[in-house]
């Protein structure tokens, strides 16, 4: 069982990834894909006259502010356009992909954050109309049924709260939750960098291996998207995934190369 997270950054081509999925499926592997869609959401939001607003939490975490209108635009883009175009591409190549989002069949369930505490121009503010959440449960039996019937689940990063509200969730941590729930052999987190870099953005400073016991020290130094990938990596390993590879999504054969150890391997 292999879980793959496809980044949502600009410039990442799904073609080489889909070719890898075909090869792995034909070789007998069971694959679950989780994707992002941040860049395309930004583009569509601008076109709709609702430009994205990014905020910094008191812990230094930068994220999209999700009021209800922003959530609905995000859901339209990631669960609609991004998810279905990826399913279409896989189907055209002979992979029986099936598109899902977290609310479908309560695939991803969690709690909605009641408020978001941010720092803006040096001042503490509390944003209460926030529609993001944290995953607490994965409907692993649903995924196992689909995999047993030969489907390749393609999951958009949305979840359903315990009260039945749709919420935005982080894609890397959604993939980590899925990998942990399925006790996946490997979780591959693809991005627009070759892995964790000791001296960002110098790609020749790639850190090739991080033992699980040393993850916390690297986490304290990481920033932005890489911090969330490392958080997800730690959560996946703690929940039972075999290993996590942060790999380069810009190269040919990105999944196969990551599984061969290219990138940053955490185990």
Image (cartoon, grey):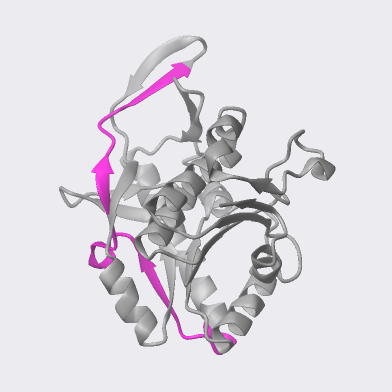
| Left or right position of 253 against 44 | right
Q: Residue at x 44, y 47 (%)?
A: 170
Q: Position of residue 208 (x, y in %)?
A: 72, 49
Q: Residue at x 37, y 69 (%)?
A: 100
Q: Position of residue 106 (x, y in %)?
A: 24, 62
The residue stretch that appears in magenta: 91-119
Looking at the image, the residue that sits furthest to the left is 163
Q: Nearer the viewer, residue 145 or 237?
A: 237
Q: Position of residue 13 (x, y in %)?
A: 68, 65
Q: Position of residue 7 (x, y in %)?
A: 58, 55
Confirm whether the magenta stretch covers residue 125: no
Residue 134's place in the image compared with 61, above or below, is: below
Q: Nearer the viewer, residue 205 or 156?
A: 205
Q: Disc count in the image?
A: 0
Confirm whether the magenta stretch covers residue 101: yes
Q: Residue at x 45, y 9 (%)?
A: 123
Q: Residue 152: in sight, yes or no? A: yes
Q: Residue 76: in sight, yes or no? A: no
| Left or right position of 136 against 100 | left
Residue 243's place in the image compared with 197, above or below, is: below
Q: Residue at x 53, y 39 (%)?
A: 213
Looking at the image, the residue that sits furthest to the top is 122
Q: Nearer the viewer, residue 237 or 48?
A: 237
Q: Nearer the viewer, residue 143 or 16?
A: 143
Residue 86's place in the image compared with 134, above or below, is: below
């Amino acid at each position: 069982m292999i879980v793959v997270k496809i980044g949502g950054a600009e410039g990442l081509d799904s073609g080489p990834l889909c070719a890898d999925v075909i090869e792995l499926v034909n070789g007998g592997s069971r694959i679950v894909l989780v994707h992002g869609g941040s860049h395309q959401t930004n583009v569509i939001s601008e076109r709709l006259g609702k430009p994205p607003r990014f905020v910094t939490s008191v812990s230094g975490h930068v994220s999209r502010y999700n009021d209800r209108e922003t959530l609905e635009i995000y859901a339209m883009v990631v669960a609609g356009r991004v998810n279905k175009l990826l399913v279409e591409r896989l189907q055209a190549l002979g992979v029986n992909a099936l598109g899902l989002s977290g609310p479908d069949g309560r695939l991803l369930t969690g709690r909605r954050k009641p408020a978001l505490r941010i720092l803006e121009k040096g001042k503490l503010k509390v944003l209460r109309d926030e529609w993001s959440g944290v995953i607490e449960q994965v409907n692993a039996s649903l995924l196992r049924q689909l995999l047993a019937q030969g489907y390749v689940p393609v999951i958009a990063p949305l979840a359903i709260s315990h009260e039945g509200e749709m919420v935005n969730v982080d894609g890397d941590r959604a993939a980590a939750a899925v990998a942990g729930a399925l006790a996946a052999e490997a979780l591959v987190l693809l991005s627009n960098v070759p892995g964790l870099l000791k001296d960002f953005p110098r790609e020749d400073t790639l850190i090739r291996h991080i033992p699980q016991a040393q993850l916390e020290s690297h986490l304290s130094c990481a920033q932005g998207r890489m911090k969330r990938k490392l958080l997800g990596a730690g959560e996946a390993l703690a929940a039972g995934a075999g290993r996590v590879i942060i790999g380069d999504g810009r190269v040919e054969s990105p999944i196969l190369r990551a599984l061969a150890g290219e990138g940053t391997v955490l185990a």
